Amino acid sequence: MKKQFKAESKKLLDMMINSIYTNKDIFLRELISNASDAMDKLYFKSLTDKTIKIDKNQLKIRIETDKENRTIRIIDNGCGMTKEELENNLGTIAQSGSLTFKEENKDQTDVNIIGQFGVGFYSAFMVSKKVEVVSKKYNEEKAYVWKSSGVDGYTIDEVEEKNTGTAITLYLKEDTEDINYSDYLDEYRIRSIIKKYSDYITYPIIMEVTNRVLKEGSDSEYEDKLEDETLNSQIPLWKKNKNEITEEEYNNFYQDKFYDYEKPLKVIHTNVEGQCSYNSILYIPSHAPYDFYTKEYEKGLQLYTNGVLIMEKCSDLLPDYFSFVRGIVDTQDLPLNISRETLQQDKNLKIIAKSIENKIKNELTNMLKNNFEDYKKFFSTFGTQIKFGIYNNYGMDKEKLKDLVLFYSSNKKEFITLNEYVDEMKEDQKNIYYASGETIEKIDNLPQVEQVKQKEYDILYLTDYVDEFTIQALMEYKEKKFMNVSSSELDLETKEEKEKTESKNKEYNDIFKVMKETLKNQVSEIEFTNRLKNHPVCLTTKGEISIEMEKVINAMPTDEKVKANLILEINENHEIANKLKDLYENNKEELEKYTKILYAQARLIEGLQIDNPTEISNLICEIMSK
């Protein structure tokens, strides 16, 4: 007699088929996991029930396909189910026998059951028009068959069966324009699904496959022969003892799993026991993926529960600043059937993610301290991501990452940490000085660095477009503020030098007014400076927006445009100062020409465009020809 699912179960079954699982391949993962659970239960019971005599090595899962009848069978020799258990576990959706078993044995630390929600079995209906489950409980005489064609209901009848365990037969749906269900009868498709999702199930998954072998008695003729083959590797690398794994094994696993042609730079193998237990193997690549800095790149670690893949890329396990890390995480503290939305709220996942973040940071810190050459290779590839992490989210993570960043030192001629910079600061030095530009060579030739170099203070050269944003997010390091050598706030003059400059600026105030009017508010101020030694002119900025930041922001494909508050500074000790005074007194028209040339010269030094290059070229030629 056909029995009906409860009304709420009908709705859930309809959701299962049409909504919960968008990837139809999942059905095989779910049924194999259920089979594994059945054998785990039987083996666990055998440890305390002396009437159960089994050899764990004989426990296995078998996959059979029949192309003519369009069926797939998943067979296990686990604990099996009684009629009542078939009724409870399969007749009521979301009633989980595995969860009940786990709760009944919660005091036993070695209970390792995959399925918990009791909904995975119904994923079979995504690909099947009918499902039959034949099951015989261990040490029971009677066997039963559960049949269903979906939401219409199910039947349970007694059936002849000599073998203990469960055999699930799926009658595949007919092919449609959108989905070719026949693909699931293909040996290669089944192999690939098992390899992806169930490769680390601890019991062998066996299937009869066609192999090309030499004919018996022949050394040249081949024939097709059906042979049993185990499709899964069973023991995952991450559950092996670290001391037993070679570097080659780690590298081969990485290259096979993540399709990289190069060895990783670093391997982080972790086994964590505690509030939330997990195993993981994480890799820091030796180079960035081709799409790493594109919108197409998707971060995340492969997430397993008890060796079964539940998510190809779990982004919640990695913060954005460590998005370059690849690897796997395997835990028994997450249910197999958890949805992506539920996963984001799972407290165990958050605990694991925090632990992984700390592991990565500690490993990078150790590399920086103990293998600086490798760390420089890492930072040249992924340093931008670390810097991004400092200024992203309004600098919330800067304390975690500030000791991982490197900048080029003008004194040492190599990359150093902020800690190294501060440790070697001169006693009279108040600030951490930096300068920005396209290349180290261009920065080194900037007029603004002259004064700082003369004091023998080190200067950090910032060449990456994110560098200055990173510095501004940090604001200070070990109570030392950052100071741009091109800032108008730079204060390295003596009291006497300041007084001399102020006096000369007052003397030339009327000259500077004429020059400023000539430039039509392109600069906020024109003044003499003491910061220049050999160069005649430079540009400095007032406020938070520097010249380099203006370049970066205005180069972005947005409508947001900014303008640095520019100051044109002239070397008071250069011959040009006297020339300007002479022109003001004798030839104001010529003064305007010199002003335009000086400003254009200052912009060129900074790598800024000139609005009127033809005019400037003509003016230079005109003056040169006199």
Image (spheres, rainbow, N blue to C red):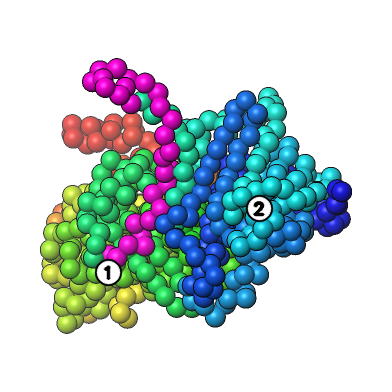
Residue 230 falls inside the magenta stretch: yes
- Residue at horizontal 66%, vertical 53%? 135
Say few, some or many: other residues with alpha carbon within 10 Å of mark 1 (under 14 / 14 to 19 / 20 or more).
Answer: some
The reply to whether residue 375 is in sight is: yes
In the rendered structure, which segment of residues is drawn in magenta? Answer: 213-242
- Residue at horizontal 22%, vertical 51%? 248
Say few, some or many: other residues with alpha carbon within 10 Å of mark 2 (under 14 / 14 to 19 / 20 or more).
Answer: many
The reply to whether residue 483 is in sight is: no
User: How far apart are the two marked residues, 2 and 1, measured between alpha carbons?
Assistant: 55 Å
Residue 328 is situated, as x and y percent measured from the top left of the image, at: 41, 57
Q: Which residue is mark 2?
A: 135
Q: Secondary structure at mark 1?
A: helix
Front residue of 55/564: it is 55
For the residue marked with disc 1, what is the amino acid?
Answer: Thr
Residue 317 is situated, as x and y percent measured from the top left of the image, at: 47, 61
Q: Nearer the viewer, mark 2 or mark 1?
A: 2
Mark 2 vs 1, N-terminal side: 2
User: Relative to residue 323, is residue 74 depicted above or below?
Assistant: above
Front residue of 450/118: it is 118
- Residue at horizontal 54%, vertical 64%? 42
Q: Which residue is mark 1?
A: 365
For the residue marked with disc 2, what is the amino acid?
Answer: Ser
Front residue of 158/180: it is 158
Q: Quadrant of residue 391?
A: bottom left
Residue 450 is situated, as x and y percent measured from the top left of the image, at: 17, 61
Residue 422 falls inside the magenta stretch: no
Q: Quadrant of the C terminus?
A: top left
Q: Are marks 2 and 1 in contact (CB under 8 Å)?
A: no
Q: Quadrant of residue 436?
A: bottom left
| Relative to 186, 451 lies left or right | left
